[in-house]
Image: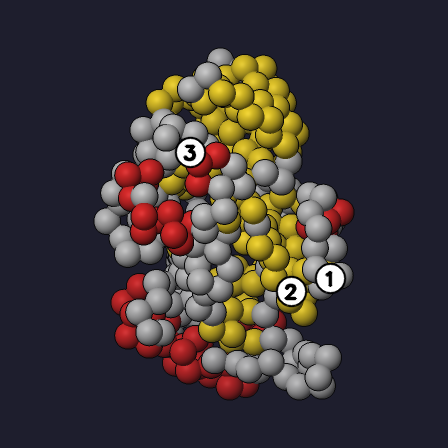
Amino acid sequence: MKEPLFLEPIFQERIWGGTALKDQFGYEIPSAHTGECWAISAHPNGPSTVKNGVFAGKTLIELWKEQPALFGNYPSDVFPLLTKILDANADLSVQVHPDDAYAKVHENGELGKTECWYVVTCKEDAEIVFGHTAKTKEEFVQQINDGNWSELLSTVKIQPGDFFYVPSGTIHAIGEGTVILETQQSSDTTYRLYDYDRVGQDGQLRELHIDQSIAVSTIPHQDPNTTPEEKNIPSAVIKKFVEAEYFTVYKWDVKGQATFNGSTFLLASVIDGEGALTVNGQTYSIQKGDHFILPENIGEFQIEGEASLIVSHV
Ligand code: ZN
């Protein structure tokens, strides 16, 4: 069963969402407030379904349980990763995620959430909130109580192609006018620290989780980001952004015909261009917006064309 698993994404409406997932990726979105494309997901809040081959129609949740060999019998009750594309048409709330230990106790056994972002597109002068300035927990709490948000929160200007590793405990917010591809632990637990005092369509403020945010935030902030490692292979540039506890994430820029070798199972998202994927003598056309998994020990495969992919593995 050495064939790629192409996946049908699920879309999630969000108050901060827009139409970029249709405008840039050509997806059929449910509304003009579509915030998230859950592209490779086995999370119960939005599992993806296989589109092709012998497993067509199966959800990734079912495959994880029924076909563990596809994933090298990876020792986890749940598929460990979740790939999303986010359209931040407005600022997201300032938030923080718990680690595994905290989530297990306080969120019914849910995983913690360490995530990372590849900036696909953004408006000029787009920025994100990343980290904070407090040196101690006392100072952190004081600034929150005083509402000194501009002093407390650190902002960073971003550009397309930037990458951010966001371990659990990192205060963060994606800013308006940004489309990112997110690779994360398969978790849906977010603690909202600050929402710019915005009211929703119902005239209500969204719920905040100040106590949980204080409990799980890393203080002082630690910036884990390093320079990506770049490697050239024939007809492709492989950029490794991060190799960390929960995932390793790369960008593959293919121009021509490149040959790869798959050992551990891989998650792949085509974020630009088009081409052909050849696995075991079978060729599949791929284009921007496609997402697929290459099962464990797929062996040698080729990608031909001009395409950029974000690829990850556990
Ligand atoms: Zn987050």
Q: Position of residue 240 (x, y in %)?
A: 44, 34
Quarter of the image where the C terminus is located = top left
> In the image, is 234 to the left or to the right of 255?
left
Q: Looking at the image, is 110 positioned above or below residue 281?
A: below
Mark identifier at residue 294: 3
Q: Earlier in the sequence, mark 1 or mark 2?
A: 2
Disc 1, disc 2: CB below 8 Å?
A: yes
Residue holding disc 1: 31
Disc 3, disc 1: CB below 8 Å?
A: no
Residue 3, quarter of picture: top left
Rate crowding at label 2 as few (under 14), some (14 to 19) or many (20 or more) other CA atoms within 10 Å.
Answer: some
Q: Amino acid at mark 1?
A: Ser
Q: Residue at x 33, y 33 (%)?
A: 296
Q: Residue at x 64, y 36 (%)?
A: 288
Residue holding disc 2: 13
Q: Position of residue 74 (x, y in %)?
A: 26, 45
Q: Residue at x 54, y 33 (%)?
A: 309
Rate crowding at label 3 as few (under 14), some (14 to 19) or many (20 or more) other CA atoms within 10 Å.
Answer: many
